[in-house]
Image (cartoon, grey):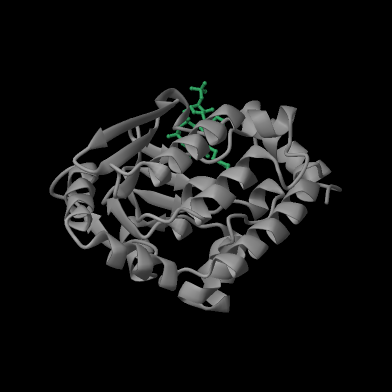
């Protein structure tokens, strides 16, 4: 479900559950976290590149998993993964090859360069699922776009096209002429050829880990409460049963 391979100093980590649009299971969060920690510690790796198998980047958390076993604490697999991603010292690049939904989109706030296929879409449907945004997106998205635009994206949840994501600064470049992974790999290799001490120090200076980790945790506390709510449980059940949710009387 997580495929990791080494190419010229770049660790390419692929979310690989294409029949479910690379939706995350608990095991996938665990494997991805381990792959990130291993790549960060591996002297032969200079850059980490994340991508998805098939035509999606990731459809976010598996909603059937959320229905059957909602996260119980701030140490649940999604939050442990986000904590690890936010603390990676080496550059993390993303080649967003298709849909990026929920945590599949919020994880991009912790990547250093994000490239998107022109067909990619970015969606933050937390509120419509009875949830709240995670991954420090309630801090990092307003920083990119201001309060009103962030409210529109997080409350109404309308998806962004690849070009809209580039316009707000979530994406560096939209790639139409070639597979986004090829373009991203070429940029990753450029980074491997730069003085590594300077690369690592620059990334460290650009990041504000204490603030970000604090927000990941704060959101996780609220997320755990919301995931158990009657509205969220109705939303997850409706997805699994392939019907529209009925939130009447639910909070
Ligand atoms: N959890 C569990 N299964 C998921 C999933 C998710 N988050 N996203 C997609 N899948 C499954 C679908 O149930 C379907 O399974 P099936 O073939 O066994 O029926 C398969 O992946 C393909 O998805 P499908 O909905 O047929 O593809 P699509 O191209 O029409 O739509 C999405 C793709 C991502 C827009 C749609 O699947 C979706 O809205 N998924 C939920 C996204 C979401 O809300 N994520 C959680 C955010 S917190």
Residue at figure coordinates x 28%, y 42% from the top left: 44
Q: Is residue 149 left or right of residue 203?
A: right
Q: Is residue 246 visible?
A: no
Q: Residue furthest left?
A: 177
Q: Residue 128: x and y, percent?
A: 65, 51
Residue at figure coordinates x 47%, y 75% from the top left: 145
Q: How many marks?
A: 0
Residue at figure coordinates x 51%, y 55% from the top left: 87
Q: Residue 228: x and y, percent?
A: 80, 41
- 203 up-or-down from 27: above or below: below
The quadrant in which residue 43 appears is top left
Q: Residue 244: x and y, percent?
A: 65, 38
Quarter of the figure with the N terminus? top left
- 215 up-or-down from 220: above or below: below
Q: Is residue 231 left or right of residue 151?
A: right
The quadrant in which residue 97 appears is top left
Residue at figure coordinates x 82%, y 42% from the top left: 230
Q: Residue furthest right?
A: 249
Q: Is residue 118 visible?
A: yes
- 105 up-or-down from 148: above or below: above
Q: Is residue 115 left or right of residue 207?
A: left
Q: Is residue 126 left or right of residue 97?
A: right
Who is closer to the viewer here, 183 or 161?
Answer: 183
Q: Residue 172: x and y, percent?
A: 29, 63
The quadrant in which residue 24 appears is top right
């Amino acid at each position: 479900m997580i495929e990791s391979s080494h190419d010229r100093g770049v660790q390419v980590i692929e979310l690989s559950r294409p029949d479910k649009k690379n939706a995350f299971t608990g095991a996938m969060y665990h494997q991805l976290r381990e792959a990130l920690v291993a790549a960060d510690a591996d002297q032969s790796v200079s850059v980490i590149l994340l991508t998805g198998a098939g035509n999606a980047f990731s459809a976010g958390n598996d909603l059937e998993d959320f229905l059957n076993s909602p996260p119980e604490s701030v140490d649940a697999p999604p939050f442990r993964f986000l904590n690890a991603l936010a603390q990676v010292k080496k550059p993390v690049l993303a080649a967003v090859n298709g849909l990026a939904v929920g945590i599949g989109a919020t994880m991009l706030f912790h990547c250093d360069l994000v490239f998107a296929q022109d067909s990619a879409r970015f969606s933050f449907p937390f509120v419509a699922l009875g949830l709240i945004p995670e991954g420090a997106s309630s801090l990092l998205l307003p920083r990119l776009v201001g309060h009103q635009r962030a409210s529109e994206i997080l409350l109404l949840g309308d998806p962004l096209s690849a070009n809209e994501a580039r316009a707000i600064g979530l994406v560096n470049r939209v790639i139409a002429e070639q597979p986004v992974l090829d373009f991203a790999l070429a940029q990753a290799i450029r980074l491997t050829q730069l003085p590594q001490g300077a690369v690592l120090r620059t990334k460290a200076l650009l990041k504000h880990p204490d603030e970000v980790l604090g927000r990941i945790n704060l959101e996780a506390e609220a997320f755990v409460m919301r995931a158990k709510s009657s509205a969220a449980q109705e939303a997850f059940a409706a997805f699994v049963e392939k019907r529209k949710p009925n939130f009447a009387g639910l909070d």
